[in-house]
Image (tube, helix red, strand yellow):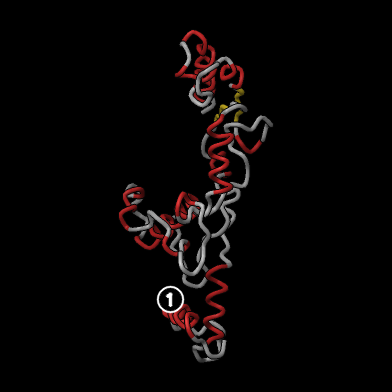
């Protein structure tokens, strides 16, 4: 890396403190080449095909990475029924704009840019130990593993945007999304009413069949177990 001056020295020394003194290239000394290897490993993280959040984190290769497909395994654990309304203004417009324009959620109205002065990635919200109550039922998870899981949820919430449109507005049938139920017809009757809240915002007799459909799906799920 050679000599590092000015602001670069600050970041260099900070990373040197984080990376530790491991001899990663096996040459018997801890030098800049080890820091470079540690940096690449830190940012080129690779998640296993099947994510096991209880697995202890490794300093050699942190088990984090892309979120694409991370929830697909839920279909092997539960029968998922997804109702959708193609005209939903919340999931179809507001949520999608938030995902595309406000990720990462930096600065005023979450419309800022990441950089050396903001360092949003390093200080994501809701990553402190106070968040551990979310995992209190998992007694086998160590504090280190809990911190890793908490951090990754924060990355998903505040940094990474969605890779698709919301499932609540997707009309096409996707085999990976579980059972699909089209509720657009009931939402279309909600003139002058928020089409995101159409079931409870409309008179009960107008949406009764939607409740019947939900009941049928729940009964079908119970019968399949």
Q: Which one is in front, 175 or 68?
A: 68
The tally of labels here is: 1
Quarter of the image containing the N terminus? bottom right
Across and down, in percent, residue 191 comes to 55, 16
Across and down, in percent, residue 161 comes to 56, 50
Q: Which one is in front, 98 or 140?
A: 98
Residue depicted at 63% across the width and 43% down the height: 164
Across and down, in percent, residue 218 comes to 50, 23
Furthest-right residue in this view: 172
- The residue at which mark 1 appears reads as 18
Residue depicted at 57% across the width and 32% down the height: 168
Residue 79 visible in the displayed image:
no
Which structural element holds mark 1?
helix
Residue 116 visible in the displayed image:
yes
Q: Which one is in front, 49 or 157?
A: 157
Where 45 sits versus 138, above or below? below
Furthest-front residue in this view: 108
Asked if residue 141 lies left or right of residue 47, the reply is left
Across and down, in percent, residue 135 comes to 36, 50
Where 125 sits versus 34, above or below? above
């Amino acid at each position: 890396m050679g000599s590092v001056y000015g602001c670069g020295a600050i970041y260099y020394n900070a990373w040197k403190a984080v990376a530790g003194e491991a001899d990663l290239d096996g040459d018997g000394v801890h030098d800049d080449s080890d820091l470079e290897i540690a940096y690449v490993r830190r940012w080129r993280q690779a998640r296993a095909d099947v994510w096991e959040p209880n697995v202890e984190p490794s300093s050699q290769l942190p088990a984090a990475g892309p979120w694409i497909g991370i929830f697909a395994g839920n279909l092997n654990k539960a029968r998922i029924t997804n109702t959708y309304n193609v005209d939903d203004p919340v999931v179809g417009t507001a949520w999608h704009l938030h995902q595309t324009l406000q990720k990462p959620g930096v600065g005023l109205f979450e419309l800022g840019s990441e950089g050396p002065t903001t360092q949003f990635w390093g200080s994501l919200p809701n990553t402190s130990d106070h968040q551990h109550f979310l995992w209190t039922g998992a007694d086998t998870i160590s504090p280190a593993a809990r911190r890793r899981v908490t951090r990754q949820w924060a990355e998903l919430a505040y940094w990474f945007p969605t890779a698709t449109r919301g499932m609540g507005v997707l009309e096409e049938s996707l085999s990976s999304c579980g059972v699909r139920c089209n509720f657009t017809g009931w939402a279309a009757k909600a003139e002058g009413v928020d089409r995101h809240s159409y079931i409870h915002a409309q008179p009960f007799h107008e949406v009764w069949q939607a409740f019947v459909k939900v009941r049928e799906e729940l009964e079908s799920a119970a019968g399949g177990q």
